[in-house]
Amino acid sequence: MTGTTTRPRQLLQGLTGSLRWRIVVWITAVVLVALTSVVVLTRSVLLSEVANSANAAVEQEIEEFRRFAAEGTDPETAAPFASPQRLIQVYLARQIPDDNELIIGMTEGTLIQMDLTGTGRRHPDPLVSTEPLVDEILSPTTVSGVFDDPDRGRTHWGRVDLESGTGQPSAHLAVAYFTQESRQAVNAQVRLLSVIGLGGLAASVFIAWLIAAQILAPVRKVREVAASISNSDLTRRVPVQGRDEIAQLATTFNAMLDRIEAAYHDQRTFVDDAGHELRTPITVVRGQLELLESSPPEERARSIALATAELDRMSRMVNDLLTLAVADAGDFLHPAPVDVAEMAIDIEDKAVTMSDRISLIDVAEGTVVLDEQRVTEAVLELYNNALRYSEGSIDLATDFLGEGADRRFRIWVRDHGEGIPAEKREHLFSRFSRGESSGTQRPGGAGLGLSIVKIIGEAHGGRAFVESAPGLGSIFGLEIPAPEESLSEGAEQ
């Protein structure tokens, strides 16, 4: 029993989980509601027309009797009718009821009824099938209404009461109109319309199935491309056709693949470069440790110093890698309003502990929202880079560019080295990229410092920049947005 109940449930879940079937179901539901509404409204309108026609026929017959009573004369005496009984008898004798119409007259307790055949025959007693209707028509509480006759269906009726002025008994004339045949015709039309609607519903299901397949074809392409992507092949893209939402989805998906491919390539390059950079100090340390036991005392101290230097270099590289990892994760900055003049002086004090070659030549005054520790880290990295790749004095300065919402804060370091050719500047901020030192020693860094500077600048919404002229030196710095409106709003708060 469990297997037999699970299979239909899985099938139902498969249908409801299919986007194509969901589209078909919703379109079918909308069409079904529309067709049902049309059928119901059509039936209501047709039945309303039947009721209106019945009421109009009853009113017309009663109006004709009233005109006859007001203008007619007795054919035997050529004078006005002497009694209501005579008036009704003469009127009934001249009437031929329409189809589904019944005219009833009653005088002195005698009921005169016209049949429905149009022969004009009189009946002294009511037909058995009309007895409930006669009782309803002769009710003294109302002179018109609608009655559900058990044999002839819904009946619309109206009555005229005649009073005798000479003490003779009262007379009544009533007109009844049966709507059973008309309502049956309406029901037949509604059934035909329902059959046509069911055919249209079946056609709409088929068309919805085809339309859903056409709509979802690009989505299937996206799924197929996504399923075919592996860590060894990120080159496949979804074909883009048209300008609709599906095309926009394909374009967005392709852009995402571009970013993933670029990030994957950068990651592979980063891992390869990091492995290459870490392999060298590890090899050096291992070799020195292997030679340590057999080395003479004077060589042992040199081996220990060399191994310690390589370990320090490897530690700096790991710290830089951790900084880049934190920056890539996004939780990197903690900005706050900072007095940039005081920050520049603090940076100079910290730079002096590394080397006294630095000079603070220009100080801008103002407050900027930034992460002081990260900016200080970036500037000290630029200063350390200038120490490594140049000789002579190094300048530190801050300034503002622009006004109002376009104002930007800049802090930069300038050396007086050989300068950097234009073709090499665009790669300076790439990870594991090194420049050429002015001395004979190979640069000791891992090529991550300027990458960290770039990350810090971009995290602030700004940029890291370099300006250089061969033979005149280079300027490295950060440019950070510092709109004046945001500062004034922050001060008011």
Image (tube, rainbow, N blue to C red):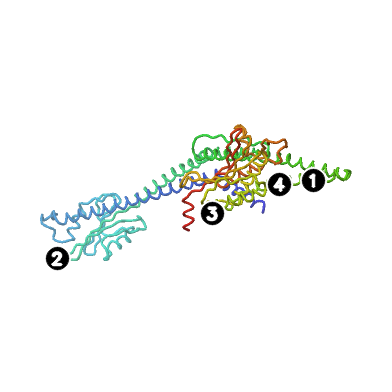
Residue position for label 1: 305
> Alpha carbon of mark 4 to alpha carbon of mark 2: how far?
128 Å
Q: Distance of mark 4 from mark 1, alpha carbons?
A: 16 Å
Q: Amino acid at mark 4?
A: Arg
> On screen, 169 above or below 231?
below
Q: Is label 2 in contact with label 3 (beta carbons under 8 Å)? A: no
In the rendered image, residue 194, in percent from the top left (x then y), is placed at 43, 46
Left-right relation of 304 to 24: right
Q: Give the mark, 4 or 2, whose residue is nearer the N terminus.
A: 2
Q: Give the numbered dot on residue 152.
A: none
Look at the numbered disc 2 and give the secondary structure of its residue.
loop
> How dense is the environment of label 2, judged by Cα within 10 Å: few (below 14), some, or many (20 and up)?
few
Q: Image point 20% across, 51% down: which residue? A: 94
The answer to whether 169 is drawn above or below residue 198 in the figure is: below
* Badge 4: residue crowd in 10 Å (few <14, some 14–19, many ≥20): some
Reading the image, the residue beneath label 2 is 165
- Local SS, label 3: strand
Disc on the earlier residue, 1 or 2: 2
- From the viewer's perspective, tell me whether residue 434 is left or right of residue 458: right
The Cα–Cα distance between marks 2 and 3, rounded to whole angstroms, is: 109 Å
Asked whether, in this view, residue 323 is left or right of residue 29, the answer is: right
CB atoms of marks 1 and 2 within 8 Å: no
Q: In the figure, residue 279 lies in which quadrant?
A: top right
The residue wearing badge 3 is 337
Residue type pointed to by label 1:
Ala
Instruction: Kindly state the secondary structure of the residue where label 4 is placed.
Output: helix
The residue beneath circle 4 is 316
Please name which of the two marks, 4 or 2, marks the residue nearer to the observer. Answer: 4
